Amino acid sequence: MPDPADPIDPVAPPPPPPPPGAAVSTDASARPTSTGLPSNVAAALACFPLIGGIIFYILEKHDGFVRFYAMQSIIFGAVWFLFNILSSIMHAILWAIPGIGHLLAGLWMLCSALVHIAFLIVLIIAIVKAFSGVRWDIPWVGPIARKQGREPL
C-alpha cells in the first residue's frame, strides 16, 4: 500500500509524452539551414577565414547564427590578410636599412610570428565555439560582424 505522504506513486502510470511539435529546441545543431548542414557544423565551417565565410554568407539565407560566423570570418580574414601584406612591406623596409637591417628584420619576423600565433588561437577558439553552438564575438571584429551580418528580410 503506497504511503499517502509519498508524492510519487509507484503504481501510477508515467505521464504521457508531449505532443509532437510542442518542444522547441534551442540547440544550434537542431536548427535547419539553407545548406542542409546542422547549424553548428555550418557555422564552424564558415569560420575558416575569407573563403569559408564568403561561401556560407552567400549560401546561407535563413540562419542568423551561421551568417554571423560567416561575416565575422570575412572581417577576421580580411584583417589577417592585411596584416600579412603590411608585415611583408615592413620586413622589406627594415631589411633595406644598412648595418642593422638584418637584426631589425629578424626582430620584426619574430613579432610577426607571435601575432600570427595569436590569430591562429583566436581562429581555433571561434571554430570550437561555433561547433559547440555558442555565439562568440571575436574582440573588435564581433560587434562589426553583428552590424553587417543582420538577418535577411
Image: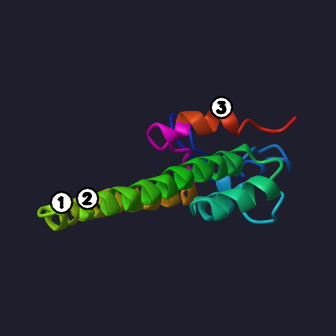
* Mark 1–mark 3 CB contact (< 8 Å): no
* Mark 2–mark 1 CB contact (< 8 Å): yes
State which mark lies toward you, 1 or 3. Answer: 1
Q: Position of residue 59 (x, y in %)?
A: 81, 58
Q: CA distance from mark 3 to mark 2?
A: 38 Å
Based on the picture, tell me whether residue 47 belongs to the magenta stretch. Answer: no
Would you say residue 114 is visible in this rendering? Answer: yes
Q: CA distance from mark 1 to mark 3?
A: 40 Å
Residue drawn at point x = 56 percent, y = 52 percent: 78
Q: Amino acid at mark 3?
A: Lys
Q: Amino acid at mark 2?
A: Leu
Residue drawn at point x = 74 percent, y = 62 percent: 55
Q: Secondary structure at mark 1?
A: helix
Q: Please provide the residue range marked out in magenta.
A: 133-142
Q: Amino acid at mark 1?
A: Leu
Q: Secondary structure at mark 2?
A: helix
Q: Which mark is residue 94?
A: 2
Q: Which mark is residue 104?
A: 1
Q: Position of residue 67 (x, y in %)?
A: 71, 48
Q: Secondary structure at mark 3?
A: helix
